[in-house]
């Protein structure tokens, strides 16, 4: 295979398979930077107009998006609208109606000794943004960061996941329908394309995906000292204490776990249940699996499929030598794995060693809440943490003692839909946050501006310093 030695604009040498459009992409990046530098995106009205255009285009392509999500993941139209299209339209609406407020310079005090003067913090766009997105919510996870990037006045390049090719193609169509290429464009393709983009210098990189690739992204970004947001995954626990409403917990766990066939970054990954309520909870979970997806979920239009055969085999392999008490039915041809419950899983089992990212729920039991807390704390910090309890003390204990990206009490997954809450991980589940104002802030450099009037100038600051030491100490408090 032919490879080409590429030296990027910052003298980093990079080898790439000869590909006719590499040069084209690089030209587009250049033109985009020129467009950013001409200042159009600084205007708030311009940004709002672009968000409107994006919203209109998403509405125009609604049918195509639904078809693509069905082709890629067999997502039902209802679920696709709820978790992808509707989610994006809501984010656009919320951003549009708050943007003027968010973008206003924030006035701050100027200490007496530094005055007279005025100080403020300005939200300044970073410039050129790279958004790399995954396949599990392939539409939403490319669009939501884009909305924030536009709101903050940046230009952007989107690299959707090649593993959801139909959705990737619709994203490219929507972007070229809504925007001029020198403002936002899409680069479709796989790892090679992503790596090429990472060899270029961006002003900010927003990556959503796995920990392993997240590390590579951060390493590439470090070459240019480019700031990053990493939205990663991990094992998000759901803890059910004995004082919880068991029926309600079961219903919400089944919904959150089997949504998109468990391929949700914030899905409850494993269940920790108090031994006194274990049996009842499992019985209720089995009940709701049947209520939601019927006796044979393979026939339910509301139940998704696994993205590809690699992930199918990986998840199926995790079921080897386990105590399956519900589900466990698989079809490689259909990429189908039924909602599955695995009982009495030990912490050393492969199911507890990696993010499951599929419709398999391992069950572990605990005797008191300290034990549950210690189990969770023995693993990397989770992206999301779910707790079902009616006891305030247990609630405070879990919130205060376990570090996690987010916590949801008495429900699952819904915290992600609250645009007033930052969404992001901590530790190995990621860094930085998005959604609503947090997304706007992520894509804005907070620039400090201080202006002095020149009316008064404290002589104490100037050498020789041997005069007012006592006064200096007093002023410093
Ligand atoms: P992935 O890391 O394999 O891929 C994500 C993106 O990175 C894709 O666009 C892909 O083309 C690109 N990529 C893959 N390998 C690369 C490489 N070597 N160099 C550069 N780019 C590369 O992730 P995935 O399988 O698409 O998604 C699943 C993971 O994403 C899970 O771990 C899940 O928890 C996580 N996730 C996190 C969130 C969140 O918001 N925190 C949301 C969704 C998914």
Image: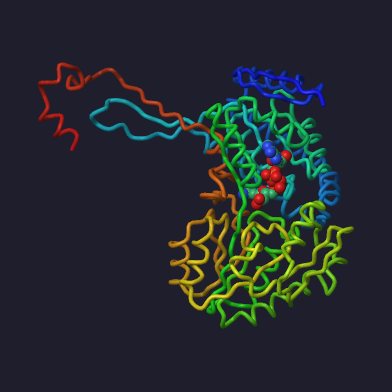
- Identify whether 335 is placed above or below 298: above
Q: Is residue 4 left or right of residue 429?
A: right
Q: Is residue 467 left or right of residue 168?
A: left
Q: Nearer the viewer, residue 472 or 425?
A: 425
Whether residue 133 can be seen here: no
Q: State the residue at coordinates (81%, 51%).
A: 308
Left or right side of 134 for 432: left
Q: Residue 40: x and y, percent?
A: 62, 22
Image quadrant where residue 253 sits: bottom right
Tell me if I can see residue 66 in this picture: yes
Vertically, is 209 above or below 371? above
Residue that appears at 52% across and 63% down: 376
Quadrant (top left/top right/bottom left/bottom right) for the N terminus: top right
Q: Residue 352: image x %, image y %?
A: 62, 63
Between 135 and 63, the residue placed more toward the observer is: 135
Q: In which quarter of the image is residue 162?
A: top right
- Which image quadrant: the C terminus? top left
Residue 398's place in the image compared with 30, above or below, is below
Judged left or right of residue 313, residue 369 is left
Picture quarter with ligand 1: top right
Residue found at x 12% / y 27%: 469
Q: Where is residue 169 in the image (x, y as percent from the top left)?
A: 82, 38
Query: Residue 192 appears at what percent x and percent y?
Result: 74, 32
């Amino acid at each position: 295979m032919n490879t080409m030695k590429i030296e990027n604009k910052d003298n980093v040498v990079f080898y790439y398979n000869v590909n006719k459009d590499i040069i084209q992409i690089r030209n587009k990046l250049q033109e985009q930077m020129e467009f950013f530098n001409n200042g159009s995106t600084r205007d708030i009205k311009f940004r709002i107009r672009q968000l409107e255009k994006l919203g209109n285009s998403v509405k125009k392509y609604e049918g195509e998006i639904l078809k693509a999500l069905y082709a890629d993941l067999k997502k039902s139209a209802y679920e696709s609208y709820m978790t992808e299209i509707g989610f994006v339209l809501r984010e656009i609406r919320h951003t549009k109606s708050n943007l003027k407020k968010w973008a206003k310079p924030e006035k701050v005090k100027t200490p007496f000794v530094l005055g007279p003067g005025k100080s403020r913090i300005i939200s300044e766009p970073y410039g050129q943004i790279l958004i790399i997105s995954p396949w599990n919510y392939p539409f939403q996870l490319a669009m939501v960061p884009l909305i924030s990037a536009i709101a903050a006045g940046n230009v952007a390049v989107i690299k959707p996941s090649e593993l959801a090719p139909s959705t990737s193609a619709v994203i490219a169509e929507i972007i070229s329908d809504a925007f001029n290429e020198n403002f936002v464009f899409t680069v479709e393709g796989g790892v090679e394309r992503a790596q090429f983009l990472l060899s270029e210098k961006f002003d900010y990189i927003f990556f959503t995906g796995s920990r392993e690739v997240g590390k590579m992204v951060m390493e590439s970004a470090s070459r240019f000292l480019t700031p990053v947001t990493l939205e990663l995954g991990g094992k998000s626990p759901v803890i059910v204490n004995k004082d919880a409403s068991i029926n309600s917990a079961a219903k919400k766990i089944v919904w959150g776990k089997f949504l998109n066939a468990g391929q949700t970054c914030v899905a409850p990954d494993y269940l920790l249940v108090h031994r006194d309520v274990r049996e009842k909870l499992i019985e209720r979970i089995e009940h709701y699996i049947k209520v939601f997806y019927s006796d044979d979920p393979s026939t339910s239009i509301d139940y998704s499929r696994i993205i590809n055969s690699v992930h199918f085999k990986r998840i199926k392999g995790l079921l080897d030598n386990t105590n399956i008490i519900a589900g466990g039915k698989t079809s490689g041809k259909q990429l189908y794995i039924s909602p599955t419950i695995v009982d009495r899983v030990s912490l050393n089992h492969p199911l507890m060693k990696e993010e499951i990212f599929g419709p398999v729920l391992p069950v572990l039991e605990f005797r008191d809440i300290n034990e549950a807390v210690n189990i969770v704390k023995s693993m990397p910090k989770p992206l999301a943490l779910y707790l079902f309890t009616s006891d305030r003390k247990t609630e405070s204990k879990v919130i205060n003692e376990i570090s996690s990206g987010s916590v949801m009490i008495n429900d699952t997954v819904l915290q992600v839909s609250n645009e007033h809450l930052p969404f992001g991980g901590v530790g190995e589940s990621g860094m930085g946050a998005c959604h609503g104002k947090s997304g706007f802030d992520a894509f804005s450099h907070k620039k400090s501006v201080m202006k002095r009037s020149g009316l008064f100038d404290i002589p104490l600051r100037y050498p020789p310093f041997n005069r007012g030491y006592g006064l200096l100490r007093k002023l410093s408090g």
